[in-house]
């Protein structure tokens, strides 16, 4: 059982570490494209944040105050 756990941990470590790469200077333009931004849809982001803090009584870290009642 211990060898299975160690093997699974080693496999997870190898898979997790393989996602790191160096980005060449000429490739950075594609990553700086606005389509790569997670908040490119401002209205959709505001709606998602409002639903999140209204349902979960949690603030999304974007400076929105209030509780979980949804009456802001």
Image (cartoon, grey):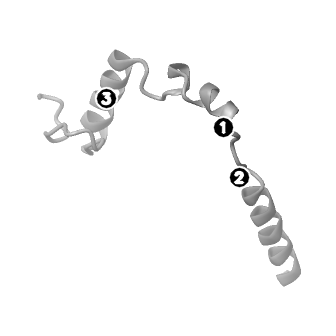
Q: Considering the numbered disc 3 on the image, is that residue within a helix, a strand or a loop? A: helix
Please name the residue shown 36% across and 24% down the image.
45
Quarter of the rendering occupied by the C terminus: top left
Secondary structure at badge 2 equals loop
Location of mark 1 (residue): 25
Count of picture labels: 3
Task: Compare marks 3 and 1 and give the one earlier in the sequence.
Answer: 1
Label 1 or label 2, whichever comes before in sequence order: 2
Determine which residue is flagged by label 2: 20
Q: Are marks 1 and 2 in contact (CB under 8 Å)?
A: no
Distance (Cα) linking label 1 and label 2: 16 Å
| Quarter of the rendering occupied by the N terminus | bottom right
The foreground one among 11 and 39 is 39
Residue at 27% of width from left, 29% of height from top?
A: 50
> Mark 2 and mark 3: span between their CA atoms?
33 Å
Q: Residues within 10 Å of mark 1 (few under 14, many from 20)?
A: few
Q: Is residue 71 above or below residue 6?
A: above
Decide which of 24, 52 is in the foreground and name it. Answer: 24
Residue, disc 3: 51
Residue 26 in the image: above or below residue 65: above
Viewed as shown, does residue 45 lie left or right of 31? Answer: left
């Amino acid at each position: 059982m211990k060898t299975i756990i160690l093997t699974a941990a080693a496999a997870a470590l190898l898979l997790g570490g393989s996602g790191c790469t160096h980005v060449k200077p000429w490739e950075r333009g594609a990553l700086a494209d606005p389509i790569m931004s997670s908040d490119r849809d401002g209205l959709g982001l505001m709606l998602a944040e409002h639903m999140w803090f209204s349902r979960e009584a949690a603030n999304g870290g974007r400076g929105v105050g209030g509780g979980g009642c949804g009456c802001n």
